[in-house]
Image (cartoon, rainbow, N blue to C red):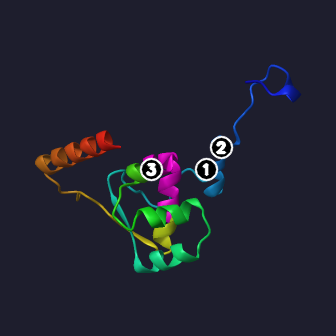
């Protein structure tokens, strides 16, 4: 569909830039968060979610009452993974969520393989 004011130029969707506006243009989180880590809302986060207006951070807090991975959050909110990582890092700094790594640095090959299978099954379920 074309925009009448601009002739044949296609209409641009404002939704493409909007998610990055929520992160003030930041594309990298302040801390590294693995895509398979588990994000869970804290008691303070649950209380904060009640007081926040509808925005991406509030949606993350609501979703993470049950532990979810950043990958799952991104899929459910239809946001880029980078945006979700920034939002989760901000919420973590404010003590509104906790992030649990699923593997330690000393994880065995079997533990890593098991995690890859769980992530693959989770992706299929989305």
Looking at this view, is 115 or 62 the one in front?
62
Position of residue 67 relative to residue 15, above or below, is below
- Per the image, the residue denoted by label 3 is 76
Is the residue under label 3 in contact with that under label 2 (CB below 8 Å)? no
How far is mark 2 from mark 1, CA to CA?
Answer: 7 Å
Secondary-structure class at tag 2: helix
The residue under the point 47% across, 75% down is: 45
Is the residue under label 1 in contact with that under label 2 (CB below 8 Å)? yes
Secondary-structure class at tag 3: helix
Splitting the image into 4 quarters, where does residue 99 fall? Answer: bottom left
Looking at this view, is 32 or 125 the one in front?
125
Q: Is residue 56 left or right of residue 108?
A: right
How far is mark 1 from mark 3, CA to CA?
Answer: 14 Å
Magenta-colored span: 74-89
Label 3 environment density (alpha carbons within 10 Å; few <14, some 14–19, many ≥20): few
- Per the image, the residue denoted by label 2 is 15
- Per the image, the residue denoted by label 1 is 19
Residue 11 position, x and y percent, is 75, 30
Q: Nearer the viewer, mark 1 or mark 3?
A: 3
Which numbered disc flags the more N-terminal residue, 1 or 3? 1
């Amino acid at each position: 569909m074309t925009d009448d004011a601009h002739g044949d130029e296609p209409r641009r969707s404002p939704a493409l830039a909007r998610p990055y506006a929520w992160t003030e243009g930041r594309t990298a989180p302040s801390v590294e968060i693995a895509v398979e880590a588990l994000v869970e809302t804290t008691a303070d986060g649950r209380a904060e979610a009640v007081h926040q207006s509808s925005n991406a951070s509030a949606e993350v807090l609501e979703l993470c009452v049950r532990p979810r991975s950043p990958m799952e959050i991104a899929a459910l909110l239809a946001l880029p993974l980078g945006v979700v990582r920034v939002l989760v890092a901000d919420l973590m700094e404010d003590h509104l969520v906790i992030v649990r790594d699923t593997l330690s640095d000393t994880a065995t090959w079997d533990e890593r393989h098991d995690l890859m299978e769980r992530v693959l099954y989770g992706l299929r379920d989305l």
